[in-house]
Amino acid sequence: MIREKKVIAAEREYEAVKEKDIPISHYFGEDTFNSRVQQMKLPQSMYKRLQAIINEGSQLDIETANAVAHAMKEWAIEKGATHYSHWFQPMTGATAEKHDSFIEMVSADEVIEKFSGKQLVQGEPDASSFPSGGLRTTFEARGYTAWDISSPAFILRSGIGTTLCIPTVFISYSGEALDKKTPLMRSNRAVNESALRLMKLLGDTGAKRVFSTLGPEQEYFLIDKDYYFKRQDLVLANRVLTGAAPPKGQQLEDQYFGSVKERILSFMHDVEEELYKLGIPAKTRHNEVAPSQFEIAPIFEEANLAADHNQLVMEMLRKVAKKHNLAALLHEKPFAGINGSGKHLNWSLSDDRGNNLLNPGKNPHENLQFLVILVATIRAVYLHADILRASVASSGNDHRLGANEAPPAIISVFLGEQLTKILEDIEKGAAAKATDEAIIDLGISSLPAVSKDNTDRNRTSPFAFTGNKFEFRAVGSSQSISFPATVLNTIVAESLDCVADAIAAKGGSPAQAAMDVIREELTKIKSVLFMGDNYTKEWEVEAGKRGLPNLKTTPEALSGMTTDKARGLFKKYRVLSEVELMSRYHIRVERYVKELDIEAMTLANMVSSQIIPAAIGYQGVLAASVTGAAGVLGKDADLAPQKELLKEVATLIGRMQSGVRDLVAKREKAHSFEDEHKKAEFFCSEVKAVMMSLREDVDAIEPIIDDARWPIPKLWEMLFIG
Ligand code: ADP
Ligand code: MG
């Protein structure tokens, strides 16, 4: 039995091999074609040209592309690469690679390694099987990849294969975005334009570029690989669909920030080595709240890079886990009854001079700008809470949001005591008073003082201001951060514009106008502010009164992407055309249906082919025992309790059998809906309900059946042994 084997494995000191025995700084980024390598490998003039193109975001000419491709190839071959791949992020949420070797025939029996500028800049994977949500029909399946020069190429190793990966966008023949990177880049452009305009209006003409920064804190579970492969549900649906709650879960609170087990720390170290080689600044690692749950957080980076890097982090977690005989579970709720996993997406805006625009400033001027941008962000969340909610909707996240462990489905904003007070005072028309020495006096009588507020750490808020950035906490652990970030950037761009328009319309002193606009906006949007405990029932009621949307399930939430408001917004900022937006909506609905379909069928299979046979086996033993005992002991035997147990087992077997029948029937019914949204709703309300009641029966029989007969690993062993 695996359990015995695992006890031995867990007790044995885990032997991990350290690949690097040098400081991180000595090898950080060694597998990326970063500016240091570019400088080394390119002629000086070419290097300068490339840097200028990267920094200004201008068009790459073919001459530079050829020079860069050549240098990149030489470098990659030195690193052992035989192939190159345009690396992109299709709408599956994963990453995609199609490898081509560097070889080119020079004669009938001779090849050389070659890589041209054209091959670097543009690829044409026959990618007809990626979801396009109706953007392409298969007969015109051509998709193009185009190099994103703002994200450095890198080396990916797998087994003995080594590949040069070139981050690319993925677009259709007619230029529609088929991926997650393109809209994110467009949203960065939008927020850049709007922020610069506002800053200029407020008198800051020094900034050349504004971009969003992201720091995603990634949660995950680790379990022993042997357990993983014994469970069809984990392999196929990434979460357990049955399993009685163990007597011990997280109630002792002895896991959070506890000392990291040797085997796990070796794993973390190994992951980090891989990330450092790729230039990914992994910074924090710790045990999370649930048993066998952990977190890794990087130092924040520019949005586009951070999104690429988070994809690689997820990939490395999965890949390195295998090497350590572990399985990394990124699902939002792999185990019922204990906390699920999310991804706190830290978001801010920065300018090219390195100023964080959500950092309360050092002088009056910066503070005014800070307040305006802060209020614009709150306005954005107030107006577009439904789109933000949609951006994190998934079948996995439905189990987590609002489950008293993660933010609710209601999107509100937390600001902390001090900022709340300042905004309240502004709204009332009074300047706030300084409350501690750290506060910088703004010098303008009508402006309040602001300082970094670290006093409160409200962990229940879905969108919390944490001193110098917002933390969007409703993002799912397995999802790509690109779309939530795209939405944030776009809605904030719109609000920055709206605020700028209002300030410009007022005329007069920009500072005074800005304060007036802040005041006016606040009265309209303050219902989105909430400082209390988001997990309570009272808040749900209160939020209802305030008219804040509370969209609990994915089908409901996804409708936020199809409103006229959403279409207008994304179109206006040229982030997603209506067709592109709708394609994303369709893909997400379809994905929801497919995921629930897989879960339903997996559960049905497990129960019929594993659980029921085990239960019938035990039922036979009980029946034989009752007859046997009656034969030996005769009338004297008190067999009522045993018969009771037999009856209980038999009843549960019967219920499980009819549960499976119900489930199969409901699933079939679901597929009879032509309309994908109706299908999703049916899965959500009907199919899920049958799954849950079937699970209850399985979980009820698990503790009363002979442990040796139970065919799949139990929750307690997966979470606590290994
Ligand atoms: P916390 O108190 O929430 O743990 P940290 O300072 O440790 O805050 O940061 C958490 C995450 O937020 C890290 O990934 C960090 O890089 C990121 N972060 C910090 N500042 C910013 C910023 N300006 N923009 C985006 N992310 C940021
Ligand atoms: Mg954190």
Image (cartoon, grey):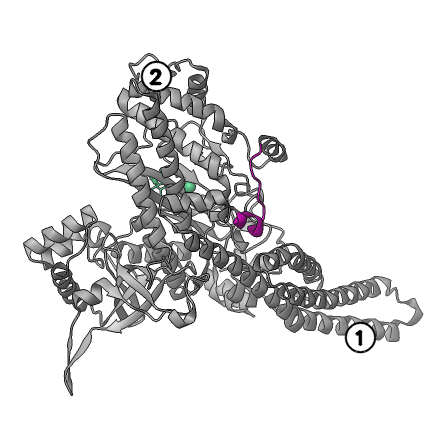
Query: Which region of the structure is painted magenta?
Result: 547-559
Q: Position of residue 569 (x, y in %)?
A: 42, 43
Q: Identify the image quadrant of residue 302.
A: top left
Tag 2 secondary structure = loop
Q: Position of residue 405 (x, y in %)?
A: 54, 43
Q: Identify the image quadrant of residue 158.
A: bottom left
What residue would you read off at disc 2? Answer: 447
Of residues 198 and 540, the one drawn nearer to the viewer in this rendering: 198
Q: Position of residue 400 (x, y in %)?
A: 55, 48
* Residue drawn at (34%, 17%) of the image: 447
Of residues 557 and 349, the one drawn nearer to the viewer in this rendering: 557
Q: Nearer the viewer, mark 1 or mark 2?
A: 2
* Real-space Cα separation, disc 1 to disc 2, in angstroms: 85 Å
Image quadrant, ligand 2: top left
Tag 1 secondary structure = helix
Which numbered disc flags the more N-terminal residue, 1 or 2? 2
The kind of residue tagged 1 is Ala
* Residue drawn at (91%, 72%) of the image: 634
Q: Position of residue 333 (x, y in %)?
A: 54, 53
